[in-house]
Amino acid sequence: MKNTTTTLKILKELLFRNILNILFFLLAIFFVVILKKTEIGQVEVIFLNVGQGDAILIQQGNYQILVDGGADDTVLYELAKYLPWYDKTIEKVVLTHPHADHINGLLLVLKNYTVGEVYYNPVEYPNLAYEYLKDTYNDILVEIKSGDVLEYEDIYGVALYPFEGEKIQEKNVNNSSVVMLFVLNGYKVLLMGDAEAELEEKLLDYTFLEGIDILKAGHHCSRTSSSISFLSFTQPTVAVCMCGIGNSLGHPHYETLEKFEKMNVQYFVTYRDGNIRFRF
């Protein structure tokens, strides 16, 4: 009887150890296979449908750059569709300018994610959200200027505006927008913020802007942006209009869409097409 009891104990211990080994094995498979599948191997850019506002996600692997955040918490729901569920870090954030439809959502991103650095143009502008950003996140704010680079694997981003040493602030804060050119695995993606024709004109000396693959058109495809001279110079293949359905400003303006059609530029509108995703 004693030998039988001892044998049963040994069998129970062996069974328990085997169960543990099987569980550890399955867990290892989960981390190696499942998590690997959720990583983004290719570089991609996603123009998030956040209503009347901008929010653009660029990512590769577990590395993310977020340009603007829209007007509200919609950005959080859209980001969750594309970021790996276990990744709560966004390495770089760019605020193009402090209008509510670009900054408000970013504050919520900063509360819900660990953010490495926030690049911005320190213009003067009366906005409580902007003041909160400067007061609360001063330790991760980085003043951006032309020539600054954001780089990771197949992602190469360079700031084109604001120009270094430019001291006079534009009265129209749209024309103080940070303008970024990203080269993603060889494809050129130009992000114009809310830049209007006056700022576009300042960029016409950059010969490397000829032949843009994707243009995030300035100011939600307003008639005040995407001038004929700028479109002729950059010759984009695709344009993206980021705006909300039924917005009070009437974006995208028909004049801008007519220019795209005249110049054979395929265009997408976030309120019509939803999130617009390109992989390279």
Image (cartoon, rainbow, N blue to C red):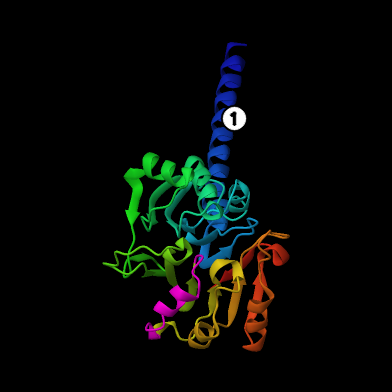
Q: Where is residue 123 in the image (x, y as percent from the top left)?
A: 38, 56
Residue that carries the numbered disc 1 in the rendered image: 15
Q: Which quarter of the rendering shows the N terminus?
A: top right
| Mark 1 neighbour class, 10 Å CA radius: few under 14, some 14 to 19, many 20 or more | few
Residue 184 appears in the rendering: no
Q: Where is residue 54 in the image (x, y as percent from the top left)?
A: 56, 60
Judge by depth and name the residue closer to the eye, 278 or 105: 105
**Magenta span:** 193-207
Q: Residue 31 vs residue 248: left or right?
A: left
Residue drawn at x 59%, y 24% is 12
Residue 205 appears in the rendering: yes
**What is the quadrant of residue 51 in the picture?**
bottom right
Query: As displayed, is residue 95 above or below residue 238?
Result: above
Most distant residue in the top direction? 1
Residue drawn at x 37%, y 58% is 121
Query: As displayed, is residue 20 above or below residue 253?
Result: above
- Mark 1: secondary structure: helix
Q: Where is residue 254 in the image (x, y as percent from the top left)?
A: 69, 75
